[in-house]
Amino acid sequence: MARSPESVSAVIKAYDVRGVVGEQIDEDFVREVGASFARLMRSEGADTVVIGHDMRDSSPALSTAFAGGVTAQGLDVVTIGLASTDQLYYASGLLDCPGAMFTASHNPAKYNGIKLCRAGAKPVGQESGLKTIAEEVAGGVPAYEGAAGTSSERDVLSGYGEYLRELVDLSGIRPLKVAVDAGNGMGGHTVPAVLGGLPLEIVPLYFELDGNFPNHEANPLEPANLVDLQKLVRETGADIGLAFDGDADRCFVVDERGEPVAPSAITALVAERELAKEPGATIIYNLITSHAVPELVERKGGVAVRTRVGHSFIKAQMAETGAVFGGEHSAHYYFRDFWGADSGMLAAMHTLAALGGQDGALSELMAEYTTYAASGEINSTLASAKAQDERMEAVVEAFAGRAQSVDRLDGVTVELAEGTWFNLRASNTEPLLRLNAEAPTREGVGAVVDEVLAIVRA
């Protein structure tokens, strides 16, 4: 079935597949994506694809349709049912086969999508397969003349939990009270399996799986979605709060005061722990991550490598450099010991291990990793790519006389006075320009943000 290239490219994006169910994505569409993915994987020697899905209402039917596309191309399917994205990555690593996770992550309920990986959770991005799939889906996927593949089921949840507990040993830490907001997403499925039976008192919030997100959107990057967790931490006297996004591959941290801990600070903490295990190792950080991260890595004798935003890009850098760990501003954390894939749960466990391995409060522990003031991600809606480009260029021109450097690795990053910089980039998944800024003081950040937004939103 041929489709317009424009409609396909609107859904098959830079590093995943994502769109509105019933308008951009339906069972016929994902069946074609499954068939094309199977053709690509078969050409690379694969014979099996593992498939998982989140708790969205549309996920079971879409994942079944995708599986039908895969088996029609002669490959076998192993379904693991309800899963977090990092649980699917675990299955891909365990079974050494390509995988497909049905989720729209933090997007609202009307969306769904697919995160694809090769065997061992290796990435599939625009230039490493998605472009080929988009072209085939637009033109019509050729039928397979051989026998159809088979489908089977496998439960990997307990194995996933055991594997993570082997990577980060929490059995000897002091007892901690841990408030967890699953946001009605897959954290409600994985947290009990991973953290149960440890010296942790879990205080659960919104653990009921509900893809309609009745309490708040499962996007902890937005401050409004952390309010309930912050209140719970303060009311219960928890030592730490954890908030997971919809597919639980990202984890956000709140300290004992209910104050958010910047993902860059978590990146620095985990980097230090990994460098203690492997001195001189390489750490990946994206270009929006705080300068505190590369400064710490270099101070601890490691090698800091900067990359653009997006999991397929970071995973490629992880593989190329042999990096032990990588972190993003958006609370994606990548581990070499986890097939180079991202796991919010592993990052949470590292934080719990660091907190429970000493006597101080989390706010005291994290203070040494919080060197600069940051804006957080600020979004501005600009519907056309042309408008986005024009506004970015106007911003570059406005700062030209003060910029120490301008680079275009991903959008534009402008370095100003020492310790002050901002990045402005187009979203890969939504019609937005995203601004991130950092400076030594809160006032400095505010001044930069005000000046940039005055141009972007003019």
Image (spheres, helix red, strand yellow):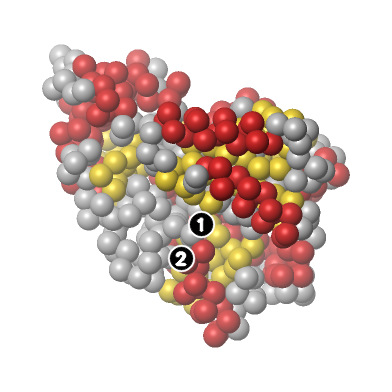
Q: In this view, does 330 lie to the left or right of 305?
A: left
Please tell me whether mark 2 sits on a helix, a strand or a loop: helix
| Residue 89, quarter of picture | top left
Q: What residue type is labelled 1?
A: Leu
Residue type, numbered disc 2:
Asn
The answer to whether residue 287 of the structure is visible from this angle is yes
Compared across the picture, whether 223 is left or right of 189 comes to right
Q: Pick whichever, 411 or 115, lies toward us.
A: 411
Q: To which residue does mark 1 refer?
A: 221
Where is the N terminus found, in terms of image quarters? top left
Residue 318, can we see it?
no
Callout 1: few (<14), some (14-19), or many (20+) C-alpha neighbours within 10 Å? many
- Between 310 and 379, the one nearer to me in the picture: 379
Residue furthest to the front:
458
Which residue is disc 2 drawn over? Answer: 225
Could you tell me which residue is drawn at 54 percent across and 74 percent down?
230
Asked if the residue at tag 2 contacts the one at tag 1, i.e. Cβ–Cβ closer than 8 Å, the answer is yes
Of residues 141 and 395, the one drawn nearer to the viewer in this rendering: 395
Instruction: Decide which of 320, 375 is in the foreground and name it.
Output: 375
